[in-house]
Image: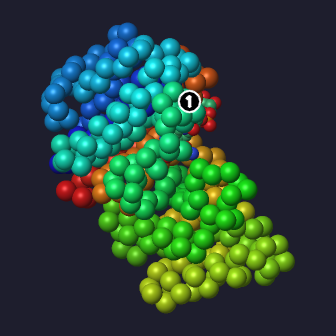
Amino acid sequence: MPQPIVLTCGEPAGVGPELAPKALAAGVPFVFLGDPRHLAAGVRWQEVAAPSGSVPEGVLAVLRHDFPAPAVPGQPDPANAQSVIDVIARAVELARSGAAGGICTLPINKEALKRGAGFAFPGHTEYLAHLAGDVPVVMMLASTTVTPPCWVVPVTIHIALSEVPGALTPGALEQAIRITDAALQRDFGIDRPRLAVAGLNPHAGENGVMGDEERLWIAPLLAHLRDEGFDLAGPLPADTMFHAPARARYDAALCAYHDQALIPIKTLDFAGGVNVTLGLPFVRTSPDHGTAFDIAGKGIADAESVIAALRMAHDMAGRRT
Ligand SMILES: NC(=O)C1=CN([C@@H]2O[C@H](COP(=O)(O)OP(=O)(O)OC[C@H]3O[C@@H](n4cnc5c(N)ncnc54)[C@H](O)[C@@H]3O)[C@@H](O)[C@H]2O)C=CC1
Ligand SMILES: NCC(=O)COP(=O)(O)O
């Protein structure tokens, strides 16, 4: 059995605190890292000193991290921003020391962290890569309830659309392919991952008529990597990559930019989607959704995604043990 997963609280004004107790339904060992005063009244929780600390069945294990301010649903308090960041860093230390099997992160609000604490990263993914020693990583979102699965990798992530053509370089695509291929083998037990690469332009450029990136460098790069042994399809027109027969032909789709990747997965499996960071020296998963301020505190947030994320982290940790 791997060590328990650390579930970070994320933005306390979001849906995180109400999802943590619901996540007990995952049936895998985990501990909530955050301020128990942010949990709803009536939640059964017990403080533990370490992730391995035991609590009775049905009780939320809490590694206490006191925040300066209470949590008001839907209204992030700048005073809490630094603690949100500190919780992530503390979870990483626990995972890296072996005290935890990995981390599963409840959503942060990027704007709140930037305004409240000058957070310099556009998301967990980039911050975790930094904490791990500025290692190259890849964001993958994985469906868990649709067949064939929809697993997607945005090669460029949280940047303006106007910056994508400049950021989507041969080096970036090659690195994403290598990291994804290695992680699908190591963490998901896929012997020879089948990867599909989307074009940047409509119709994957249609032989240069609608854009040149595919013809000039994406196709040659894929040919070169195929010679090395990678199982690669593409560059494919993105609009016809995600219907079921197309998805059956690959294990993961590498996409040029954030929305090209995330719209299909969140359309097909918003409830069950899991965000997983590939390439880190520790396990990290997350639900696919954000802080959902519009419904925070109402008790109606769906826990399926965080449950799937905890199970995936547990399975990944088991493979690494
Ligand atoms: N891993 C992370 O930390 C993530 C953080 N975010 C951040 O979250 C914030 C809000 O992002 P949005 O684009 O508004 O996306 P969002 O996922 O928070 O909300 C989009 C819509 O989905 C609904 N929704 C989200 N989670 C739900 C759940 N568990 N159950 C039922 N309905 C749910 C919301 O009520 C809303 O209508 C932003 O700051 C964004 O950067 C977004 C995605 C992931
Ligand atoms: N759109 C996905 C997202 O925002 C998740 O970001 P991260 O916090 O996991 O890096």
Quarter-of-image position of residue 21: top left
Colouring style: rainbow
In terms of depth relative to the viewer, which is nearer, 118 or 91?
A: 118
Which residue ends up furthest to the bottom in the rendered image?
227
Quarter-of-image position of residue 172: bottom right
Residue that appears at 36% across and 41% down:
104
**In the rendered image, the vertical position of residue 59 relative to residue 102, given as above or below:** above
Which residue ends up furthest to the right in the rendered image?
209
Q: Is residue 268 left or right of residue 97?
A: right
Residue 249 image position (x, y, % from top left): 56, 71
Circle 1 residues within 10 Å: few <14, some 14–19, many ≥20: few
**In the rendered image, the vertical position of residue 53 relative to residue 154, given as above or below:** above
**Quadrant placement of the C terminus:** bottom left
Check disc 1 and report its element: helix, strand or loop: helix
Residue 73 image position (x, y, % from top left): 52, 17
In terms of depth relative to the viewer, which is nearer, 71 or 191?
A: 71
Q: Circle 1 sits on which residue?
A: 115
Residue 256 image position (x, y, % from top left): 63, 63
Residue that appears at 51% across and 65% down:
252
Residue 312 image position (x, y, % from top left): 36, 49
Residue that appears at 80% across and 80% down:
208
The amino acid sitting under disc 1 is Arg
Residue that appears at 31% across and 20% down:
66
Confirm if mark 1 falls within 8 A of ligand 1: no
Residue 264 in sight here: no
